[in-house]
Image (tube, rainbow, N blue to C red):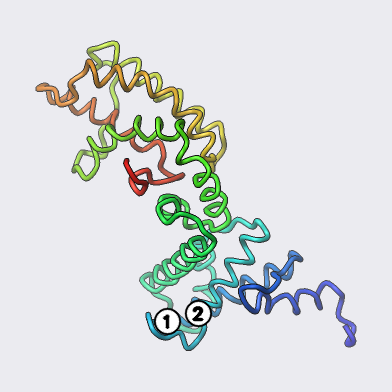
């Protein structure tokens, strides 16, 4: 400021080094947030590309501190950003080539730091892993979702949702079914199939109406519509029918139902699923 720089510029320069430790303040001005995050991304990606990633016992270049500072800044300011896109942008500015493997390494490193930060704050590990399996690319969104899930996942309503999704998921989990299968309503033989498919479409539409990043509450509320149709379906319908086309159609429906939580959380990471 003594040299005539605008106050906003001086603040951004000061904030670019924040936070200096885990208990320090974070940048608050838009320019300060941008510079602080960009500077840490540049350092992180560049050091990983140069082969300076930390080991289990040594972190001479302070990459953990760099990643933690970036995460604190994003989370405490409520800033959503795609880590993959941000790392890709930083990689294009490096004086050395940054391979795809190194970009993935940098991304995974930041996600591990995010997981540790959440665990240190007292979030249950299983809840953290369930959310990070689907939302690790946006730290702010991931933290908000972890908080929502931590409150919801031991409620009777959430237990009912887990029970609803458990059987369809287990039917198709780890199986090498044709991902190109689509559900053909003309192949339905029983009313229970039609009722379940109608319930699935209703849940899918309700989740879509909740926006690109629906919350846990919206997921639980929408998924309640599956409980009764799924119960009736499994009481009356044999999925593994002898007719290959009918069997494939039913498995495709199970696959689509099991995929409804995708983009929000991984139910399989939670106990008793």
Seen at 54% across and 36% down, the residue is 217
Q: Position of residue 191 (x, y in %)?
A: 29, 11
- Give the vertical position of 151 relative to 26 (above or below): above
**Left or right: 190 in relation to 44:** left
Please report whichever mark, 2 or 1, sits nearer to the chain's N-terminal start.
Answer: 1
**Quadrant position of the C terminus in the picture:** top left
Seen at 55% across and 49% down, the residue is 147
- Give the vertical position of 177 relative to 249 (above or below): below
- Name the residue carrying label 1: 54
Q: For the residue labelled by badge 2, is the local secondary structure a helix, a strand or a loop?
A: helix
- Name the residue carrying label 2: 63
User: Are the residues at dot 2 and dot 1 in contact (C-beta closer than 8 Å)?
Assistant: yes
Q: For the residue labelled by badge 1, is the local secondary structure a helix, a strand or a loop?
A: loop
- Residue 164 figure quarter: top left
Residue in the foreground of this view, choosing between 115 and 27: 115
Q: Position of residue 262 (x, y in %)?
A: 41, 42
């Amino acid at each position: 400021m003594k040299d005539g720089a605008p106050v906003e510029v001086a603040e951004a320069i000061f904030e670019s080094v924040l936070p200096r430790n885990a208990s320090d303040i974070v940048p608050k001005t838009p320019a300060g947030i941008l510079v602080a995050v960009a500077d840490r991304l540049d350092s992180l990606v560049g050091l990983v590309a140069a082969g300076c990633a930390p080991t289990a016992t040594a972190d001479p270049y302070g990459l953990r501190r760099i990643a933690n500072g970036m995460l604190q800044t994003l989370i405490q300011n409520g800033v959503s950003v795609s880590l993959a896109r941000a790392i890709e942008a930083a990689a294009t500015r490096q004086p050395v080539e940054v391979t795809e493997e190194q970009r993935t390494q940098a991304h995974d490193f930041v996600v591990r730091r995010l997981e540790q930060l959440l665990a240190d704050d007292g979030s249950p590990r299983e809840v953290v892993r369930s959310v990070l399996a689907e939302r690790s690319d946006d730290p702010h969104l991931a933290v908000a979702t972890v908080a929502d899930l931590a409150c919801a996942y031991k409620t009777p309503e959430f237990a009912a949702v887990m029970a609803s999704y458990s059987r369809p998921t287990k039917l198709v989990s780890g199986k090498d079914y044709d991902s190109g299968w689509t559900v053909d309503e003309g192949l339905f033989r029983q009313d229970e199939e039609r009722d379940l498919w109608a319930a699935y479409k209703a849940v899918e539409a309700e989740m879509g109406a909740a926006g690109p990043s629906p919350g846990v509450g919206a997921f639980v509320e929408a998924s309640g519509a599956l409980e009764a149709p799924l119960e009736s379906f499994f009481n009356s319908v044999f999925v593994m029918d002898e007719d290959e086309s009918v069997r494939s159609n039913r498995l495709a429906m199970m696959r689509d139902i099991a995929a409804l939580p995708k983009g929000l959380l991984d139910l399989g990471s939670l106990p008793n699923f």
